[in-house]
């Protein structure tokens, strides 16, 4: 009788343990599914921001390419007249400045308000602009890294497209500057799914270019995203390496007293 009682008791305990194990496995499975679903939703929302910013840049580059094709066989003086007419005609002009460059420097540059600047030597231009122009003189169209323009006193991104002769040689470069307001609007508004994410745009060194409104990811006084207190030094070094390699990745940081996951997606354009 005593042995029978022990067998029943042991069987009951084993069934109980099995149920607990099965329950724990079920909970873990649900948690994993929820985590996977959340990660998928977050990645989808992040891709919306990425795609919209890429499209915005693509539109600006296409507009500049049309200007470069117009300039085939024309002189820098003809560009100056064309740019001034264009700036006068477009009060909602998307470019703050239009310029025509050669290997010696900026031949003509016209601001949105009609101000004309001429014969600016290459060495007087910002390093990011010099790099972009030299790249375009090799026959490639691209966008600069975001840089601070002393004359305009704001952060800009510049686009450049080569002007080619009939034989294919590059005779000059059409360049145009754009402020970051359009990109700032993209970062601030909710995604199509109405998810409001904390989004930060950084360069390959981690320097913050722009961010969504009041995001804790870019606390006041922080110039570099990876230098803030919540980012571990080893994590920061790993992130720098992955950004240099243009890799998508994620990592955790301490943010407002909690561990948070940060997802990073390479922009894929000049750092």
Image (spheres, rainbow, N blue to C red):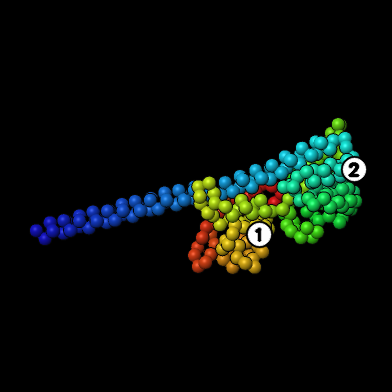
Q: Position of residue 214 (x, y in %)?
A: 58, 62
Q: Which residue is mark 1?
A: 208
Place of residue 23 in the rendered image (x, y in percent of width and height, measured from the top left):
31, 53
Q: Classify mark 1: helix, strand or loop.
A: strand
Q: Position of residue 240 (x, y in %)?
A: 65, 57
Q: Nearer the viewer, residue 254 or 68?
A: 68
The answer to whether residue 147 is seen in the rendering is yes
* Residue at 90% in and 43% down: 77
Residue 145 in sight from this viewpoint: no
Within 10 Å of disc 2 (Cα), the crowding (few <14, some 14-19, many 20+) is few
Q: Residue furthest top?
A: 166
Which residue shows up at 61% across the image and 45% down it? 51
Disc 2 designates what residue?
A: 77
24 relative position to 198: left or right: left
Q: Is residue 58 left or right of residue 167?
A: left
Q: Position of residue 269 (x, y in %)?
A: 69, 47
Q: Is residue 219 above or below residue 123?
A: below
How many labels, in total? Answer: 2
């Amino acid at each position: 009788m005593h042995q029978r009682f022990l067998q029943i008791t042991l069987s009951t305990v084993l069934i109980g343990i099995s149920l607990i194990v099965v329950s724990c496995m079920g909970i873990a499975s649900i948690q994993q599914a929820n985590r996977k679903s959340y990660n998928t939703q977050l990645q989808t929302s992040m891709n919306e921001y990425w795609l919209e910013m890429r499209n915005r840049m693509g539109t600006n580059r296409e507009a500049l390419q049309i200007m470069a094709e117009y300039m085939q066989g024309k002189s820098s003086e003809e560009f100056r007249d064309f740019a001034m007419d264009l700036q006068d005609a477009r009060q909602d002009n998307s470019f703050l400045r239009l310029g025509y460059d050669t290997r010696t420097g900026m031949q003509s540059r016209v601001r949105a308000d009609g101000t004309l600047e001429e014969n600016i030597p290459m060495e007087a231009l910002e390093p990011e602009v010099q790099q972009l122009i030299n790249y375009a003189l090799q026959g490639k169209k691209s966008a600069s890294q975001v840089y601070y323009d002393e004359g305009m006193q704001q952060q800009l991104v510049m686009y450049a497209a080569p002007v080619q002769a009939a034989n294919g040689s590059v005779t000059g470069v059409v360049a145009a500057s754009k402020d970051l307001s359009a990109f700032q609007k993209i970062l601030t508004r909710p995604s199509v799914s109405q998810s409001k994410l904390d989004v930060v745009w950084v360069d390959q060194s981690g320097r913050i270019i722009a961010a969504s409104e009041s995001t804790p990811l870019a606390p006041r006084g922080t110039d570099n995203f990876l230098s803030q207190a919540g980012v571990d030094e080893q994590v920061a070094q790993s992130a720098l390496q992955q950004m240099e390699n243009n890799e998508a990745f994620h990592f955790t940081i301490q943010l407002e007293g909690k561990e948070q996951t940060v997802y990073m997606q390479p922009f894929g354009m000049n750092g």
